[in-house]
Image (cartoon, helix red, strand yellow):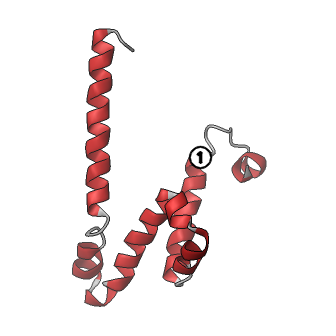
Amino acid sequence: MFFVTYFHFSQESSGNPTVAVLIILTVLLTGFGVFDHIAQWAGAGTIIPVTGFANTIASAAIEHRSEGYVLGVGGNMFKLAGPVIVYGVFSAFVVSIVIIIFRALGVM
C-alpha cells in the first residue's frame, strides 16, 4: 500500500519495489545484528522466504569479511545460498519445459 499510496504504483507493479525494500531492510538489520532477534521473535525468515535468503547471504558475507573481499566474501557468500539458487533455476527450467510441451499439445 505504501508504493500505491505515495508513489502512485498500480497494485500489480507495487510488488517488486516492496520485495526490494524487504531485502534492503533485511541486509541492514542483519549487518546491525538485529535481524536474528526479530526472526526468532516473529518468525520473519520463515514467513517471507526472501528475507531469510537475504539474511543467509548477508550473514555469510559478514562472517567471512576478515578473509578479504574477493576470497572471503565473494568465495563464501553463496556457499549456503548456492544450492537454493541452483534449485530455483532448475525448477524454473523444468516448469518452463512442461509449459512449452502443454502449449504444443494444445492443453494450455
> Quadrant of residue 44 in the image?
bottom right
Extreme residue toward the right, this view: 5
Residue located at (50% from left, 72% from top)? 27
Instruction: Please indicate whether residue 11 sits to the left or right of residue 33 in the image.
Output: right
Q: Is residue 105 above or below residue 27?
A: above
Look at 50% across and 62% down and name the residue there: 46
Amino acid type, callout 1: Gly
Which residue: 33% across, 24% down?
Answer: 99
In the rendered image, residue 36, in percent from the top left (x then y), is placed at 51, 78
Q: Determine whether, in the image, residue 92 is placed left or right of residue 12.
A: left
Left or right: where 44 falls relative to 88: right
The 10 Å Cα crowd at callout 1, few under 14, some 14 to 19, many 20 or more, is some
Q: Residue at x 38, y 70 (%)?
A: 57
Up-down: is 45 above or below 98? below
In the figure, 61 relative to 1: above or below? Answer: below
Q: Position of residue 14 (x, y in %)?
A: 63, 45
SS of the residue under disc 1: helix
Q: Nearer the viewer, residue 82 or 11?
A: 82
Residue under pointer 1? 15
